[in-house]
Image: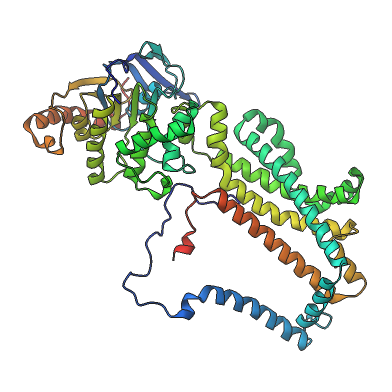
């Protein structure tokens, strides 16, 4: 299930996104530039409303940028596609499909035979620790289990990049920690590029190779922090001096931007 | 209409009210629900019996109302003959035809109107204009439009079921979570696949609600139409019985309509539940 390091190069070039509603224009993202290397884990960290989800939606192809472009492995993003699967915050599984039906969805769209897609879906369900839950419906699962199905459902498509929009934001603290460790374990197996949106500093630093700290709206990169903590990482890493130093650096910036977000957008 | 529990959410009351170590309940409490239901029907007949036995006259008069046992005798006699079955079959055939046509048309148009703006603009306004007209008001026009009595009554029955079905289908489609559509596109679904895999199952709970309401309305329309213009059918039978002063037959006709209506609604419920195994059980049932 390894990526081989060949795919997953994301180039976000000078991206600008603005929305117009009833004569008002809201600038969500301004002149945002970021490159990822294949198989890299990058977090977008910022105060709520800073445009980080909008940015992720542009990579997914859900929103069209007003300036600049997103290029994935040399192709300009124009529409949503299975090469850029998204894990949402919550309630995005198809309630009428079983767990395995949800995971098989992408393969079914590609016309993979029933036998083959069941086999592949089982592999990915095993990977996220959900063997035995194939026939359950999403409504019967806990929030953490639902998110694991969401991850398997994206990874079964072997995407160039997995986009994650605060996927653990709705979970309790203990479950969130377990899910973070699980995600790192899964990522070690599949090595796809991950862009992970969060407002949780610990989460961003614990998971990522690099953390893009974003300004208040319109979102720009304020700081790009390289996290050189050794992998594989365990939960205990957040108590180390290196982690604390990074956290102190990021915390100041995030707090300033949160205050900025409250006082209104910059000119 | 359209009040269907949101799929994918756990019921609010999921923990059992009775603690695990509670003493076993006595038999009559555990059998309480069926017993209560039978008693409730029994009580209905007892009250009916007393009202007719005493010829109660309290502004509402019961002197001409047949007693339960008279109705029972009449029912036995009717069920032994052939003529009554001809009426029942005529009504069932009209309901089945009218409801089937309304289901096909209503669901198809509802899906189109709910999903495509062009269809909404072109198809929905006439539906909104015609919807408030009670089906009974269509009877004269229907007799002029359709060549046979049978087809004009089926038309009325179809009309009755059509509007609730189309409206609930439209609401069901419009209530689909946009995030599910986005999820599908980011998993590689095209337009046709989204319609098939997201729009139709997403609207299904609301469609079934529409079918359930539509079945009730189509019975009302069928019986009204049969009473006005029929030569067969349970509605015609009931009205005719009144005309020839056979009051116990009137009540047999009414009860037959009640039983058939109840059975057809139950059928819709059972089929609906079969088609939607993902829906949580009713909160009421868990207590």
The residue at the point 32 percent across, 14 percent down is A11
Q: Which residue is at 19% across, 27% downward?
A: A253
Q: State left or right for residue B12 relative to residue B201.
A: left
User: Image quadrant of residue A73?
Assistant: top left
Q: Quadrant of the C terminus of chain B?
A: bottom left
Report whether B13 appears left or right of A3.
right
Rendered location of residue A125, percent (x, y) = 35, 38
- Colour mapping: rainbow
Name the residue rendered at 38%, 21% in the picture.
A59
Decide: is B39 above or below A2. below
- Outermost residue toward the top? A74
Q: Position of residue B190 (x, y in %)?
A: 53, 25
Residue at left offset 55%, top offset 41%: B201
Side of B250 relative to A266 (left or right): right
B264 or A25, which is in the foreground?
Answer: B264
Residue, far left: A241
- Looking at this view, is B264 or A216 the one in front? B264
Image coordinates for residue B42, horizontal then vertical, percent: 65, 79
> Is B250 or A212 nearer to us in this picture?
B250
The image quarter in which residue A222 lies: top left
Location of residue B41 by image quarter: bottom right
Instruction: Count the labels in the image.
Output: 0
Q: Residue furthest front?
A: A115
Residue A51 visible somewhere in the drawing = no
**Residue A236 x/y as whole percent:** 12, 38
Residue A103 seen in the figure: yes
């Amino acid at each position: 299930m390894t990526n081989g390091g060949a795919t997953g190069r994301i180039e976000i070039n000078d991206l600008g996104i603005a929305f117009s509603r009833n004569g008002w224009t809201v600038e969500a993202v301004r002149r945002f530039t970021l490159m990822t290397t294949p198989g890299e884990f990058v977090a977008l960290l910022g105060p709520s409303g800073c445009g980080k989800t909008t940015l992720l939606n542009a990579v997914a192809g859900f929103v069209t940028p007003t300036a600049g472009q997103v290029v994935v492995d040399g192709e300009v993003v124009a529409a949503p596609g299975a090469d850029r699967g998204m894990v949402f915050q919550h309630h995005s599984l198809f309630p009428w499909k079983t767990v395995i039906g949800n995971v098989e969805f992408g393969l079914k769209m590609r016309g993979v035979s029933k036998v083959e897609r069941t086999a592949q879906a089982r592999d990915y369900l095993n990977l996220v620790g959900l063997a035995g839950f194939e026939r359950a419906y999403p409504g019967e699962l806990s929030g953490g289990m639902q998110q694991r199905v969401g991850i398997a459902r994206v990874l079964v498509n072997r995407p160039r990049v997995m986009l994650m929009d605060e996927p653990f934001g709705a979970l309790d603290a203990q479950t969130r920690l377990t899910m973070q460790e699980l995600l790192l374990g899964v990522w070690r197996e599949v090595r796809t590029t991950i862009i992970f949106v969060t407002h949780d500093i610990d989460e961003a630093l614990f998971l990522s190779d690099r953390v893009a700290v974003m300004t208040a709206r319109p979102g720009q990169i304020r700081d790009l922090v390289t996290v050189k903590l050794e992998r594989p990482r365990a939960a205990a890493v957040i108590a180390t001096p290196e982690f604390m130093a990074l956290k102190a650096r990021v915390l100041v910036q995030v707090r300033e931007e949160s205050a900025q977000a409250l006082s209104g957008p910059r000119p | 209409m359209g009040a269907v529990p949101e799929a994918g959410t756990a019921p609010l009351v999921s923990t059992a009210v009775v603690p695990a170590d509670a003493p076993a309940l006595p038999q009559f409490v555990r059998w309480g629900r069926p017993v209560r239901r039978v008693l409730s029907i029994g009580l209905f007949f007892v009250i009916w019996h007393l009202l007719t036995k005493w010829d109660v006259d309290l502004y509402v008069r019961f002197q001409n109302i047949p007693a339960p046992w008279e109705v029972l005798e009449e029912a036995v006699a009717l069920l032994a003959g052939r003529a009554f079955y001809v009426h029942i079959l005529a009504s069932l055939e009209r309901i089945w035809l009218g409801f089937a046509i309304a289901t096909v048309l209503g669901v198809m148009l509802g899906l189109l109107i709910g999903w495509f703006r062009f269809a909404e603009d072109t198809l929905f306004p006439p539906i909104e204009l015609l919807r408030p007209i009670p089906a009974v008001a269509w009877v004269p026009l229907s007799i002029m439009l359709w060549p046979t009595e049978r087809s004009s009554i089926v038309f009325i029955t179809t009309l009755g079921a059509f509007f609730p079905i189309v409206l609930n289908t439209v609401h069901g489609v419009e209530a689909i979570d946009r995030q599910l559509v986005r999820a599908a596109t980011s998993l590689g679904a095209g337009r046709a696949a989204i319609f098939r895999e997201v729009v139709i199952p997403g609207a299904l709970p609301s469609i079934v609600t529409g079918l359930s309401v539509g079945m009730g309305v189509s019975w009302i329309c069928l019986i009204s139409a049969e009473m006005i213009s029929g030569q067969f059918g349970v509605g015609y039978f009931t009205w005719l019985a009144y005309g020839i002063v056979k009051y116990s037959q009137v009540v047999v006709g009414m009860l037959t309509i009640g039983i058939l209506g109840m059975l057809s609604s139950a059928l819709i419920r059972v089929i609906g539940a079969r088609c939607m195994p993902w829906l949580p059980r009713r909160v009421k049932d868990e207590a």
